Amino acid sequence: MFETRTFRVHALHDGCDHAHGVDAETFEEAAVAFMEAWHPEVDSYGQASVVVRDVETGVEHCFRVDFESGETSACQ
């Protein structure tokens, strides 16, 4: 089991100055929580690209998140 960490998350097209703090156990959970709370603009497939940065380590990952299903995949 993972510990809850703080992440900064923003839509890829918005840039880091629009990031929000999200507490979650994993990068993927933080991406989905961001989608649910802040509803970034989705594309015609109902997906958005979001960047998730671990506040403590600075590690970043980009995810495509399906708004309906909550499924995530790595950005391409």
Image (cartoon, rainbow, N blue to C red):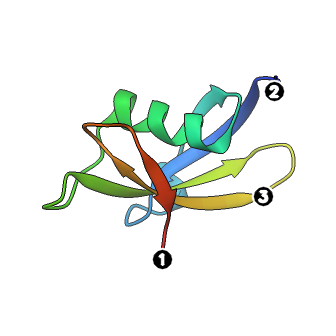
Q: Outermost residue toward the left?
A: 44
Q: CA distance from mark 3 to mark 1?
A: 17 Å
Q: Residue at x 48, y 77 (%)?
A: 76
Is residue 75 shown left or right of residue 13? right
Is residue 68 shown left or right of residue 21? left
Residue 40 x %, y %: 30, 46
Question: Residue 30 falls in which quadrant of the image?
Answer: top right
Relative height, residue 56 to residue 23 (above, below): below
Q: Amino acid at mark 2?
A: Phe
Q: Nearer the viewer, residue 12 or 63?
A: 63
Q: Nearer the viewer, residue 12 or 18?
A: 12
Relative height, residue 35 to residue 48 (above, below): above
Q: Amino acid at mark 3?
A: Val
Closer to the chain start, of discs 3 and 1, is 3
Q: CA distance from mark 2 to mark 1?
A: 26 Å
Residue highlighted by disc 1: 76
Q: CA distance from mark 3 to mark 2?
A: 16 Å
Closer to the chain start, of discs 3 and 2, is 2
Residue highlighted by disc 2: 2
Q: Secondary structure at mark 2?
A: loop
Q: Residue at x 37, y 66 (%)?
A: 13
Q: Outermost residue toward the right?
A: 57
Q: Residues within 10 Å of mark 1 (few under 14, many from 20)?
A: few
Q: Residue at x 31, y 37 (%)?
A: 69
Residue highlighted by disc 3: 59
